[in-house]
Image: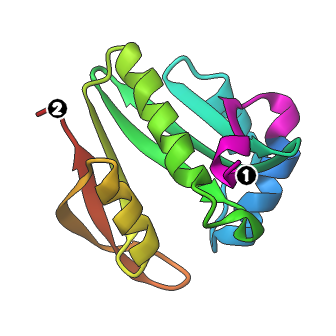
Amino acid sequence: MQSEELILIREMTEEDLDTVCEIEKEIFSQPWSRQGFLDALHSEYTRYLCAVKDEELIGYCGYLRSFEEADITNVAVKESARRQNAGKKMLTELIHRGEQDGIEAFTLEVRKSNIPALRLYETLGFASCGVRKNFYDLPKEDAVIMWRRPE
């Protein structure tokens, strides 16, 4: 059995927030706060999913909805759990659930230097549509704007 098959995707809960914040701090130079995630969980305009393998939360992703569009605000997989398709599986499920709820287009920003993430998003139908200059800090870097729109 492949490791991808062992990954369960489920809705994020408040009980997940301590682990989510640990992963957030491990990966990002300017991590979201626990309160930021808590507020997002309680918003009617967001959806957050977690990836779980062997009963361990290894990743999460989410979006903020505005009418028929959604901005994917977070995508993270623990360093030790990468290359197991957790990110692809989470995003595929997030998009699927969003489309079931009437979302027609998804957007996100990604560091210009994050080639693995750029390639992943391209495999999911996202296309580069522009650049946000100096979008990221620590270190300062441009973001590639990507969209996934209906055919």
Secondary-structure class at tag 1:
loop
Residue 56 on image: x %, y %: 86, 47
Residue located 36% across and 67% down the image: 118
In reply to whether residue 66 is colored magenta, the answer given is no
Outermost residue toward the left in this view: 151
Q: Amino acid at mark 1?
A: Ser
Q: Which residues are magenta?
A: 1-16
Crowd rating for badge 1 (residues with CA inside 10 Å; few <14, some 14–19, many 20+): some
Q: Quadrant of residue 71?
A: top left
In the picture, measured across the screen, residue 76 lies left or right of residue 126, that is right
Residue 110 on image: x %, y %: 40, 65
In the picture, measured across the screen, residue 22 lies left or right of residue 118, that is right
Residue located 64% across and 69% down the image: 28
Crowd rating for badge 2 (residues with CA inside 10 Å; few <14, some 14–19, many 20+): few
Up-down relation of residue 108 to residue 116 (above or below): above
Outermost residue toward the front in this view: 1
Q: Which residue is mark 2?
A: 150
Residue located 42% across and 27% down the image: 96
Q: Which residue is mark 1?
A: 33
Up-down relation of residue 80 to residue 52 (above or below): below
Q: Quadrant of residue 16?
A: top right
In the picture, measured across the screen, residue 53 lies left or right of residue 137, that is right
The span from disc 1 to disc 2 (Cα, nearest Å) is: 33 Å
Q: Amino acid at mark 2?
A: Pro
In the picture, measured across the screen, residue 45 lies left or right of residue 3, that is left
Nearer to the camera, 10 or 35: 10
Q: Quadrant of residue 144?
A: bottom left
